[in-house]
Amino acid sequence: MKKHTDYRAYGYIFPSMISILLFTILPIIFTVFISFTNYNMYHVDVFETIGLKNYQTVLGGEIRSAFFSVLGWTLAFALLSTAGSYFVGMLLATLLNNPHMRESKIYRSILIIPWALPATIAILAWQGLLNEQYGGINTLLRMMHLPGMPWLTDVFWARFALIIVNVWLGYPYMMNVCLGGLQAISPTYYEAAKIDGASRWDCFRKITFPMLTRLSTPLIISTFASNFNNFGNIYMITQGGPAVPGSQFAGGTDILASTIYKMTTWSNRFDLSATLSVFVFIIVGGLTLLSMNLSGTFKEEN
């Protein structure tokens, strides 16, 4: 018997498909097109295609060293932020999951505060705490007769501070993910391990950690992709600074997203910023596809 197609279903998804086309697909196509042109402040009204010249400029031209320096810091920032958030969240989740811990719900409510606060307010609070002159952290250090740290004026310490802030903002999410994963692990595994004489460390190393990592791998990858493109935290705390001598577009803490922003708004180099955007799209898109494959998004159920 021939199946009847109900075309009314297409009517329900038509508005969302139009939105995706107008606000996602067409801007991506336009960005890719601009990356093959000389569209900038000198060629706004009349511009022309120049082939792969912008890509050659980024990969082997005048901004090559700045590009690879920013790319390296972006990868390090995303990796360390994601790993730090995950391990802190996993440690806290393991402690909170202990049935013998009293008032665990109160501790959980306190530890989730960074996630509950509006991100803008939390970031501005950290910006004040990290201020070199009157910030709370340096004030506390001076009270302990220790020198204040140049949190926002030295490249190393600014990067270190940004990673700490990002870990603080991200660990509650990972803690909740790990709590859900811990509750999904059958207690029979631990009972069998105890019968075999396994210690608590052995149970964590051979049961808890492998199973948690397997369950949360897609979320870890998606968090890495989000941190890779985390423009807001960087720009609100340091605005990409401190300045790096000889670098026209990027400061010491600029990631690719903030570098693209500066290229577009400060220098009107739409051609080069579009080229960098293509690289970001390829990296983040690849990570998203990997996460979706690992989570089984594309699998069809019979």
Image (cartoon, helix red, strand yellow):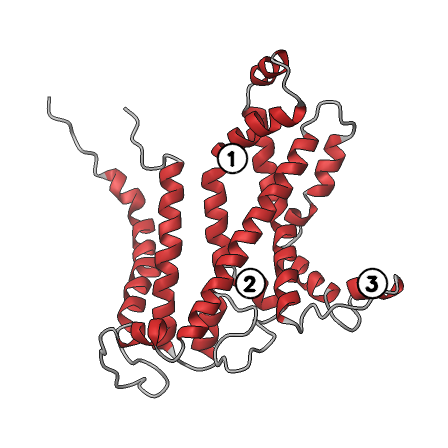
Quadrant of the rendering where the C terminus is positioned: top left
In the displayed structure, does residue 98 sit left or right of residue 48? right
Residue 53: x and y in percent read 27, 77
Q: Earlier in the sequence, mark 2 or mark 1?
A: 1
User: Can residue 256 be seen at all in this image of the molecule?
Assistant: no
Question: Which residue is more in the foreground, 265 or 253?
Answer: 253
- Label 1 crowd (10 A; few <14 / some 14-19 / many >=20): some
Residue 141 is marked as 3
Question: Amino acid type of disc 2?
Answer: Gly
Query: In the picture provided, is 65 more to the left or to the right than 14?
Result: right
Q: Is residue 155 above or below residue 96?
A: below
Query: For this rendering, which residue is in front, 193 or 6?
Result: 193
Q: Earlier in the sequence, mark 3 or mark 2?
A: 3
Q: Which residue is painted at 70% across and 26% down in the image?
A: 98
As drawn, is 196 to the left or to the right of 215? right
| Outermost residue toward the bottom in this view | 42
| Distance from the alpha carbon under mark 1 to that under mark 3 | 37 Å
Q: CA distance from mark 2 to mark 1?
A: 28 Å
User: What residue is pinned by disc 1?
Assistant: 213
**What residue appears at the point 70 percent right and 46 percent down from the top-left corner?**
113
On residue 239, the disc is: none
Mark 2 secondary-structure assignment = helix
In the foreground, 3 or 279: 279
Residue 58 image offset from top left, x and y in percent: 36, 73
Residue found 62% across the figure and 25% down from its top? 202
> Which residue was labeled with disc 2?
232
Tell me the kind of residue under disc 1: Thr
